[in-house]
């Protein structure tokens, strides 16, 4: 399994991967599947160019990163296809983003996880993230997210 940083020309594959992720886990992302379907190709190209995204060679998983206005990198958009879960792909993808953030000399990296998503919470804790105690309500009005940092 090879994990690499996605290239801007991968935008079509990234779009398809994001659609799969949104269909599989609709409450895990800020964007809905309908919103993603409505995006123009130019928006997908811009997303692929502006966001650091790590993928595997088969485009069955992704993890993204960006630097927030406060200068702290954030791990975003983490998703692995159901048939690839438990294979180590998630850790490789997350490590790609973590190493990218370390390359920026960032003292920490943050992420948000839906509270109650026990497998995700355990995964992030296992690779070194810890809860900050900060929570927010998701726009679906029923779920909350917890901030974690490494």
Image (cartoon, helix red, strand yellow):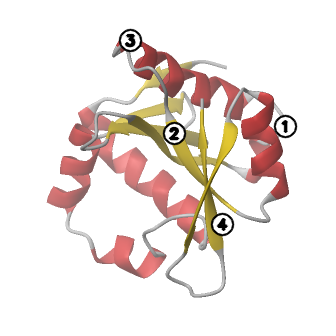
Q: Residue furthest bottom?
A: 141
Marks 1 and 2 sit apart, C-alpha to C-alpha, by: 23 Å
Q: Which residue lies furthest to the front in this view?
A: 133
Q: Which of 42 and 132 is in front in this view?
A: 132
- Mark 1 or 2, nearer chain start: 1
Mark 4: secondary structure:
helix
Q: Residue 86 carries which label?
A: 1
Q: How far from the left and from the top, in percent, is residue 77?
A: 50, 50
Could you tell me which quadrant the N terminus lies in?
top right
- Mark 4 or 1, nearer chain start: 4
Marks 3 and 4 sit apart, C-alpha to C-alpha, by: 32 Å
Tags 1 and 2 in contact by the CB under 8 Å rule?
Answer: no
Residue on which the image places disc 3? 103
Viewer-nearest of discs 2 and 4: 2
Image label count: 4
Residue on which the image places disc 4? 24
Marks 2 and 4 sit apart, C-alpha to C-alpha, by: 23 Å
- Mark 2 or 4, nearer chain start: 4
Mark 2: secondary structure:
strand
Instruction: Name the residue rendered at 37%, 34% in the picture.
Output: 72
Viewer-nearest of discs 2 and 3: 2
């Amino acid at each position: 399994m090879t994990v690499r940083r996605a290239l801007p020309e991968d935008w079509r594959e990234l779009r398809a991967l994001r659609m799969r992720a949104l269909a599989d886990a609709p409450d895990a992302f800020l964007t809905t599947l309908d919103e993603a379907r409505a995006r123009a190709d130019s928006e997908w190209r811009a997303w692929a160019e502006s966001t650091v995204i790590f993928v595997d060679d088969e485009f069955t998983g992704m993890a993204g990163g960006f630097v927030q206005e406060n200068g702290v990198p954030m791990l975003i958009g983490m998703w692995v296809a159901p048939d690839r879960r438990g294979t180590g792909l998630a850790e490789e993808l997350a490590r790609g983003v973590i190493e990218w953030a370390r390359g920026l000399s960032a003292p920490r990296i943050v992420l948000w996880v839906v509270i109650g998503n026990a497998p995700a919470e355990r995964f992030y804790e296992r690779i070194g993230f810890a809860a900050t105690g900060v929570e927010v309500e998701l726009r679906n009005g029923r779920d909350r997210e917890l901030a974690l940092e490494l």
